[in-house]
Each structure stands twice: as C-alpha cells, then as structure tokens.
Amino acid sequence: MRAIRVCGLAASALLSACTLTALADEGRALNSGHEYMVTTNYPNNLHVIDLASDSLYKTCPMPDRFGPGTVQLSPDRKIAYVLNNHYADIYGVELDSCKQVFHASITQQPGEKARSMFAFTVSHDGKELYTVANPTLLLNDRYEVKEPRLDVYASDAGLDAKPVRSFPAPRQLTIMQSGDDGSLYVAGPDLYKVDVKTGKFQVLIPSRNWQRPNYSAPDVLYVWNQQTYRHEFSLLYTTARFKDQQHDPATAEPLYGLFSVDLKTGKTETTDFGPLTEIYFSGMRSPKDPNLMFGVLNRLAKYDIKQKKLLQAATLEHSYYCISFNKAGTKIYLAGTFNDVAIFDAQSMQQIGKITLPGGDMAITTAQIFVR
C-alpha cells in the first residue's frame, strides 16, 4: 500500500490537522477478462474500479494539475490517456503499473498558449492520438487568437511527444472518436468526418446547419467523450418541433434527441427520443436494448426511443454528470460532480450501491467502462 499524507490548516489557530489516506497498490495489475471502470478526480487521481465487486481496485497519482480529467482508452485497454493540467496536456498512463508512458503539451508553437476543449481521442488501431489545439499568441502588447489545428501524434512517442502531422481545423470543436476505417469523427457546429492523412473535414451530420422541416436549430452541450460497448459516437441535442410553417414558439413541442455514428460502419442517425422536460448532461443507449435511452443530471431517466416516451425516472442524492453501463446492460454507473460513483439497477431504476473515492470532486470527468 502507498500512503499519502493529506494536511488541513486551521487558519485561526495556525494549526495543521493531518490524516493518512491509503491508496490501493499502484503496481496491482488488471486481470484479463475482468470488467473495470476508470475515472479521475481532485487533487489529481486516476482511479480503477472493479465492477465484479463494485469497489476501488487501485489509484494512480497523476502529474501536474487536474482538469478536466477526460479519459480515453487505448484499444487494448492497457493505457488510459487523460486530458489534464487545465486542458493543456495529454498524459498516457499504463494501467497495470501506473507508469506514465506518454505526454504531449497542447502548446507546441513558440510564444503561444493552447488548450484542447475535450477534443482528443486514440485511433482505432492505437497507433496515433488526435487532438484539436486552440492557440493564442501571447505578444508584448496584445493577445492574438489563432486558427485551431488538428494535431496528430504517434502514441509511442514517449514523454515529449510532438505532432507528426498538423492541419487547419474549424472552430468550436469538442469531442471525437475514431472509426474502424481510420476516419475521425468530430463534434462541432456540425458533426464532421475527417481524413486524418489529408486533414479534410467533411460535414457528416448537419447540426447547426440541419434542414429538418418545421424544426428549430438544435442546441448541443455535450463534452463527455465515451467509448461505448455499442461502439458508437453519440451526443444529445435539444430542439423544438413546430406545429406548422408559422413556427410559433408558443405551440412548439420541445424535444430531446440523439446524434449517433456507428464506428464500425459509419452509418449515421439523427433521432428524437423524448419530450424536453429537464436537462441532461450526458446520455447513453443501453448495450442490452438499443431502444432504451438513459440520461442523467439532476435525475436518472429512462426513455423508449420508438415511443418517444419517458418510462422511468430515479431521484438522485445529488447531480451526476456522466452515465455509463456495464457490458451486460444491467447496471448503470453515475460519475462526475462529487467523489462518489452511484450504482443503479437498469431494470428497476433503484440505487443498489455507491463507491466513495479517495480525494475530492470528479467535476466534469469522463468515466470509461471496459473489459480487459
């Protein structure tokens, strides 16, 4: 076991109160065929949870600073890549040993400061890593906002990785996933398909520019970049469906919907799944029944997509941002905000457990569930 001393200082008396927090053995290797969940939290931890026992398996301390803690996994599920250090760096951590094996600074040009707004992922074969840098040039008398760029790294580049290719990119790009054919799918004003060899961006799913008759333009706020058992890239939208061509907002029907790309075939989907009665920060289709859609923020909710109907909702102890499923589709894991992971039965929507993590808030982390 590795112990970390956590000290608190009472300002009025200038006295320190210290406790010892034991972290699970960093060198404890993961077991083949077992199902795990990885998530991150303050002060700067990467946690591995064993889903067989629903307990903390190990904790890897991360370098530098926390935020946002977005996690992407290599295809062999041996390395967790984390966007961290206030959106400024990507780290690769070997899950078996907690050893850092990759590091790339989003800032690559002299005189600039660059950040990635959740926009990174690993290629389908694990050989490359993609990110979108949003650079600002820091001059003596002013700042100059520069054009974004898509940077491509070799995943085996080590602790001082530099882009092997860079291309101009549209603004406002966020989450992304790699398809089985090598294409990169990126969310932004529209959902794009990108050729990572040439840097060509092609609109795959119109979002801001969709042309659905009697619909308002959709609104998208989605930064949870999850690698799902259904092997799809998806995000939620809200919209209003008007009664007629008068487009009267007073009689419009507010709706929730789903943009989705099948990462195996490239097939796309734009589907309304239910009435907009509350806000969800993340959503996911059940790996057991793709007609069931789940969303979470202040409540956990279940929808029938075909009927566009809310089936069940569960009260939460507090807000959660990130929803995940086990492979069987029987259990739901809720992460984000505080330092506990809530566990719900997907059928009954009853809470069946909770895992408290060492450290502080998970904030807007992206949790991932996988089988080694």
Image: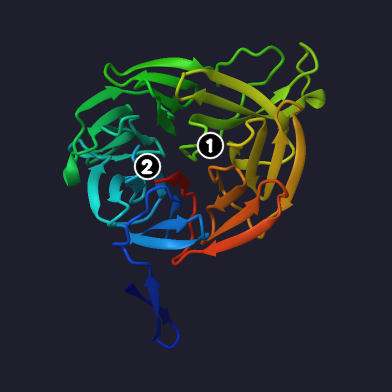
| Left or right relative to 173: residue 291 | right
- Distance between the alpha carbons at the discs numbered 1 and 2: 19 Å
**Image quarter (top left, top right, bottom left or bottom right) of the N terminus:** bottom left
Per the image, label 2 sits on a secondary structure element best described as strand
Q: Residue 24 placed where, x, y %? A: 37, 67
Q: Residue furthest right?
A: 251
Q: Residue 20 placed where, x, y %? A: 38, 79
Question: Measuring 49% from the left and 40% from the top, which residue is drawn there?
Answer: 224
Crowding at dot 1, Cα within 10 Å, few <14 / some 14-19 / many 20+, comes out as: some
Question: Measuring 49% from the left and 39% from the top, which residue is drawn there?
Answer: 223
Of labels 1 and 2, earlier in sequence is: 2
204 or 243: which is nearer to us? 204
Q: Give the amino acid type for the residue marked by disc 1 in the picture.
A: Tyr
Q: Which mark is residue 142?
A: none
Q: Is any part of residue 39 visible from this angle?
A: yes
237 or 232: which is nearer to us? 232
> Residue under circle 2?
73
Per the image, label 1 sits on a secondary structure element best described as loop
